[in-house]
Image (spheres, grey):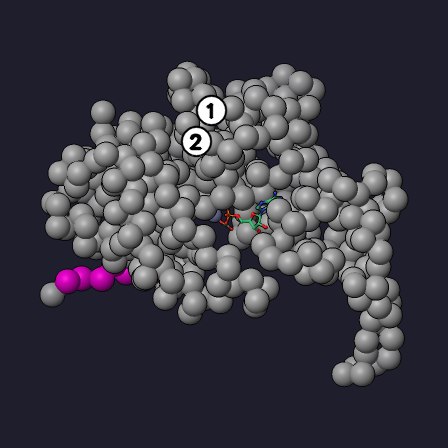
Amino acid sequence: MSTILGLESSCDETAAAVVDGGRWVRSNIIASQHDLHAEYGGVVPEIASRAHLERLWPVMQRALDEAGASVEQLDAVAVGNRPGLIGSLLVGVSAAQAMAWAIQRPLIGIDHVQAHLYAATMPAPRNDLAAPGKMGQADEDAPAAGSSCYPALGLVVSGGHTTLYRVDSPLSPTVLGATIDDAVGEAYDKAAVILGLGYPGGPAVDRAAARGRSGRHRLPRSLLAPDSLDFSFSGLKTALLYKVRGRPVGRGRQSRFERSAEDLPEQDRCDLARAFQEAAIETLMTKVERGIAQMASAGHPPRSLLMGGGVVANSLLRSEAVALEHRCGIPVRLAPMALCLDNAAMIAGLAWHRLNENVDGDGLEIAAVATPGRAPRPQRHR
Ligand code: KG4
Ligand code: ZN
C-alpha cells in the first residue's frame, strides 16, 4: 500500500499530511493563518505566501512525526499545484519539488478543487471533529467508497468555488454548472462583514444563524433559468446588505447607508443570518436536486452524491444533505469535518489514484497554476 506525503498551500492554510492507500489518514496537520488576515477582513496574498514560507517546513516535519513515518518510507510526494494564489502555490510546489528530488520519489501535482470532491469519499480520520449525524463519526474502518459510488453527482462549495460535477472516477469530474458571480463561501464571508460578525465569515454566520429565528425575514433564492445548473449569490448578498443597512442616502461620494449592522439589536442580526443561511443552503440543495434529475434523464442516474469544500462544514447543509438522502434515496457522502476546510490529506488521498495511473508521477517540472485553463508552460531546468 503506497504512503504519500501531501502538501497544501493554495490559500491561507499551510498543511501537510501522510496518507496510506488513498484513504487512511496517518497525520493531517493544518496551520491556519486566520489570525494574520483577520484585521484585513480577507486574505492578503503577500502575507499568506510569507507565512507559508515560515510554516511549511515545521508543518511537514510534524506530519511525518505524527505519522511515525521516515522520508525513506514515502512512496511519493504530492502537492496542490492549482488553482490558488500564485505566491502561495509556489511555496508548496517548490517545497514538494525539493523533497521529491531529495528522496528520489515521484512528484504528483493535484487539482485542489478535485481534491475537495475526493475528500467526500474518504473516511473520517480518527480525530475528526464531532459533526451532526452519522457523517461526522470517526469511521476509518467503514467500507471504501470505491467504484460503486460512480457515476456520482458532485458538489464543491468553498471560498473560491461553487461547482456541480458529474463524476465518473476520482480523477475525471466533468463540470455541469458553476457560479456566475460569487462562490457561496465568499458570499458567507461577505455576509459576515455586512452583519459585523468578523472573519472568517462562514462559521460566524453559521453560529449566529443557530440563534436566529426562522421566518422573520425572507431573502431571495436566485435559481436562474429553470434548467440551469449554474449558481448566483450576488443578489442574495446585496439583498442582505439593504436589509441590514437600509437604503443608500445621498448621491455619489456623499452616499451613505441609513444605518450600520451595529445599530441593529443582536437578535435581529441573528435573524438575518438565519434568513441568509436558509436562502443560501436551499439554493444549493435545489440545484443538487436539478442535477440528479438531469443526470437521470440523460440515462446516467447518480449512484451517490459527493459534497466537499469548506461550506460542507455548515450545520444546515449537513442536516439538509441527510434530508435529501432520505427524499431522493441516493446515498450522500459528505467530506468528514476534518477534511472539509483546506487540508493536505485530500491532496495525498487523490494523489494515490494518480500514482496508480502513472507510477512515474508528473515529473519534477510541474508548475504552479493560479487559474486552470491558463496553464503556463512547465519551467525547463537548464
Ligand atoms: O475549502 P475552503 O477551506 O477554502 C477554499 O478552497 O476556498 O473553504 C473556505 C470557505 C470560506 O469561505 C468559509 O467562510 C467557508 O468555507 N466556511 C463555511 C463554514 N465553515 C467554513 N461556510 C458556511 N458555514 C460554515 N460552517
Ligand atoms: Zn479549498
Q: Residues within 10 Å of mark 1 (few under 14, many from 20)?
A: some
Residue farthest toward the bottom in the current orientation of the protein: 253
What's the CA distance linking mark 2 and mark 1?
Answer: 7 Å
Q: Position of residue 359 (x, y in %)?
A: 19, 35
Chain-order first, disc 2 or disc 1: 2
Indicate the amino acid at tag 2: Asn
Whether residue 265 can be seen here:
yes
Residue placed at 18% from the left, 54% from the top? 98
Element under disc 1:
loop
Q: Amino acid at mark 1?
A: Ala
Closer-to-camera residue (180/321):
321
Picture layout, residue 297 above or below residue 193: above
Residue 135 at x, y percent in the picture: 55, 25
- Identify the residue at horizontal 11%, vertical 45% (top origin): 104
Location of mark 1 (residue): 138
Residue, disc 2:
127
Q: Magenta span covers which residues? A: 375-381
**In-image side of 147 versus 318 (left or right):** left
Q: From the image, which quarter does the N terminus lie in?
A: top left
Q: Is residue 161 left or right of residue 82?
A: right
| Residue 32 part of the magenta segment | no
Other-residue count near label 2 (Cα within 10 Å), few / some / many at <14 / 14–19 / ≥20: few
| Magenta residue check for 379 | yes
**Which residue is depicted at the point 31% across and 32% down?**
26
Q: Is residue 21 left or right of residue 364?
A: right
Q: Which picture quadrant has residue 139? A: top left
Residue 366 seen in the figure? no
Q: Left of 173 or right of it: where is 214? A: right
